[in-house]
Image (tube, rainbow, N blue to C red):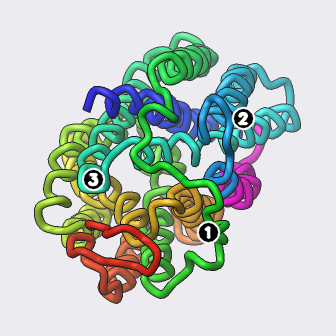
Amino acid sequence: MKRTWLLGFGFFSISITWALYNAFVPFFLDSFVSSAALIGFMMTIDNYFALFLQPWIGNRSDKTSTRFGRRMPYLLIGMPLAAVFVVLIPFHTSFFTLVLFMVLMNLSMSLYRSPTIALMPDLTPENKRTKANGIINFMGGIGGILAFGAGSALYDRHRSLPFLAAAAITLLSLFILFRFIREKRDSVVPIAEGTPRIRLRGELDRTTVLLLLAIFCWFVSYQGVEALFTLYGKHHLGLSEDAAAFSLTFFSLFFVLFAIPSGWLGNRFGKKTVILIGIGGLFAVFAAVPFVEALVALRVLLALGGIFWACININSYPFVVSTGEERSIGTRTGLYYLASSLAAITSPPLLGLVIDRFGYGSLFVCAAGGLALAFLFLLLVKHAGKTATVRPGSATLRG
């Protein structure tokens, strides 16, 4: 379990960087463009690269063999590059340099995101992965709290300070992972020489496709709200920029508090059941937000939303991995991020267009609709994320 907490530093650095990016980069773009749809598009242009890189790199890391292991070489290259470019973002001198630094930062993160997450199932027995995912997401949630809480205070002093802090945390996390994690020593998923190659197309069975569609739909809702909420708070509710960003702290805080319990619930009652409860609860929260104008009530709803998002997010990645073979962990990690990256591309510009047409009040109406679709797709998945399943040529899998 100590190793799981150490692995959490990788997700911690990713989460804090993404949270800062989504909270404050829209303000930089807002000084150049006035359309919410265009801002939404610019917030996702980097994901077009991630859409193709993350599945390929995840698949590639399954076949990588070095003295550092399968995943670590990607961290050693990507994390220092990401630290450099995240520092440069607030020092942009024009619209062109801002977009350039955004793209380069996210390209760098695409190099190591899938391998970092794949380390968890690599080093964790299958029947403990949901709990382990709760722990690493707990640390990721701490990153979100720091980004929206401390990050807001730092941004108020100077807009570059949150990004400098994120770069320092990324480099510190890399040092911890490289110093204490030894893949060849710690792995519980040894890959024998001569193992047949893993192909992306071969992993797309009916269960996986339906699960990826559900993941896409709930990330459309989540990514759209996360990317555009600070503008919603500023333009619809009249909040200051730092108050709008700080409000998201309540979502992250209660996500963190419920991360580990939701992993236990997934193990106890099945991942599918707990995810369905989370989708239903988050749907109710998003449907209620447009009727709320008081800041206290809004933050209470965001806190409830964080609890339900934990039920969804903590159990979804282990669910994807549990429906495949052990040797395809990196590939299925890439597929998971393929679905979430595609949602990140689709959601902000789509919801931005709706906002341009109907106003910021429509943001949460659309987000609730995405969750309704996710609920329907997940109902069609027959795998419960709990019962034993044996696939030809693979070990027994426990959901």
Q: Quadrant of residue 77?
A: top right
Category of crowding for the residue at label 2, using alpha-carbon neighbours closer than 10 angstroms: few (below 14), some (14–19), many (at least 20): many
Write down the region rendered in magenta: 31-57
Category of crowding for the residue at label 3, using alpha-carbon neighbours closer than 10 angstroms: few (below 14), some (14–19), many (at least 20): many
What kind of residue is marked 1?
A: Leu
Q: Are marks 3 and 1 in contact (CB under 8 Å)?
A: no
Residue named by callout 1: 350
In this view of the protein, can residue 190 be seen by the observer? Answer: yes
Image depth: mark 2 or mark 3 in front: 3
Q: Is residue 389 left or right of residue 51?
A: left
* Element type at mark 2: helix
The residue lying toward the viewer, choosing from 297 and 21, is 21
Q: Which mark is residue 337?
A: none
Looking at the image, tell me whether mark 2 or mark 3 is earlier in sequence order.
2
Image depth: mark 1 or mark 2 in front: 2
What kind of residue is marked 2?
A: Met
Q: Where is residue 115 shown, x and y percent of the image?
A: 58, 44
In this view of the protein, can residue 298 be seen by the observer? Answer: no
Extreme residue toward the left, this view: 268
Residue named by callout 3: 130
Check the image and report above or below for 327 versus 110: below
Q: Is residue 383 magenta?
A: no
Extreme residue toward the front, this view: 193
**3D distance between C-alphas at marks 1 and 2:** 23 Å
Q: What quarter of the picture does the C terminus occupy?
A: bottom left
Q: Quadrant of residue 392?
A: bottom left
Q: Where is residue 202 shown, x and y percent of the image?
A: 61, 79
Q: Is residue 55 magenta?
A: yes
